Amino acid sequence: MIKSKFDLLIFDWDGTLMDSIDWIVYCLQNAALECGHKAPDEGAAKDIIGLSINQAMSVLFPELDQFETQRLINRYSQLYFSRQLGVEDLFPGVLDLLNALKKSGFMMAVATGKSRKGLQHAFEQTGIGGYFVASRCADETASKPDPLMLKQIIEEIGIRKESAVMIGDSVHDLEMASNAGISSIAVTCGAHAEQQLLPHRPLEFLQNTSDLITFLRLNNGK
């Protein structure tokens, strides 16, 4: 049994639990090309992961009107959902991590820039939705880095914000946590490198999400 000052662990999805960054970049780039636009480079595409899809497209293609932006979003979605996902697309060790955290009594939630349709699809194809007591998606609340989705999760579960921690791989995750007044833990296996995440002052940098179990054991009760 692992003891911790945190009762609730809130995970980002893409780049934190699921190894999906390269697939998202591929879909963004090819959707742009197929719609007749210049494809964003890899760095620019990674930088918007975590935002809502509407906000992401506005950042990548600010010159497009609403109709063309929606056409791009539709094509991106078609490409993204064309691939079958499974538990093997989770980062190594994530399933064992979730099992260990559940056995130790932690509550877990998801705060993601995905749509509800996208998260439900991921839950169904990986089979891990049952580990989470709450979730919020960008199309049903404010997009990251606005803190609203974290505040809603914390309020729904009924805990103090000091008892929650956000685990994420992007600057949007960590900035959201800071805006909500909660602690964060950074993982460097996803969209952004440690140097990019450093200004947001997470409690720890983890090379792999599965390393969270070691961090909690070493910092139990602190």
Image (spheres, helix red, strand yellow):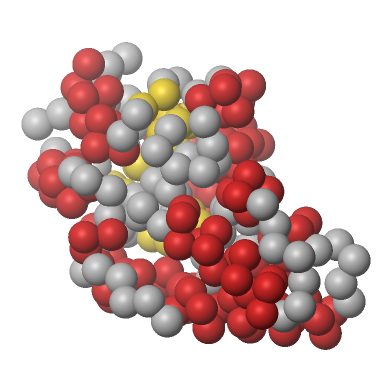
Q: Residue at x 76, y 65 (%)?
A: 38
**Whether residue 131 is situated above or below residue 127 in the rendered picture:** above
**Whether residue 222 is situated above or below residue 200 in the rendered picture:** above
Q: Is residue 96 left or right of residue 137?
A: left
Residue 44 x, y percent position in the rendering: 68, 49
**Whether residue 23 is situated above or below residue 192 in the rendered picture:** below
Q: Is residue 197 left or right of residue 189?
A: right
Q: Residue at x 28, y 48 (%)?
A: 91
Residue 112 x, y percent position in the rendering: 50, 57
Do we see residue 165 in this rendering? no
Q: Quadrant location of the C terminus?
A: top left
Residue 137 x, y percent position in the rendering: 53, 64
Numbered label tally: 0
Quarter-wise, where is residue 84 in the image?
A: bottom left
Quarter-wise, where is residue 57 in the image?
A: bottom right
Residue 15 x, y percent position in the rendering: 43, 48
Q: Residue at x 51, y 43 (%)?
A: 191
Q: Is residue 38 left or right of residue 218?
A: right
Q: Is residue 49 left or right of residue 80?
A: right
Q: Residue at x 68, y 73 (%)?
A: 33
Do we see residue 69 in this rendering? yes
> Is 18 or 32 nearer to us in this picture?
32
Q: Quadrant location of the N terminus?
A: top left
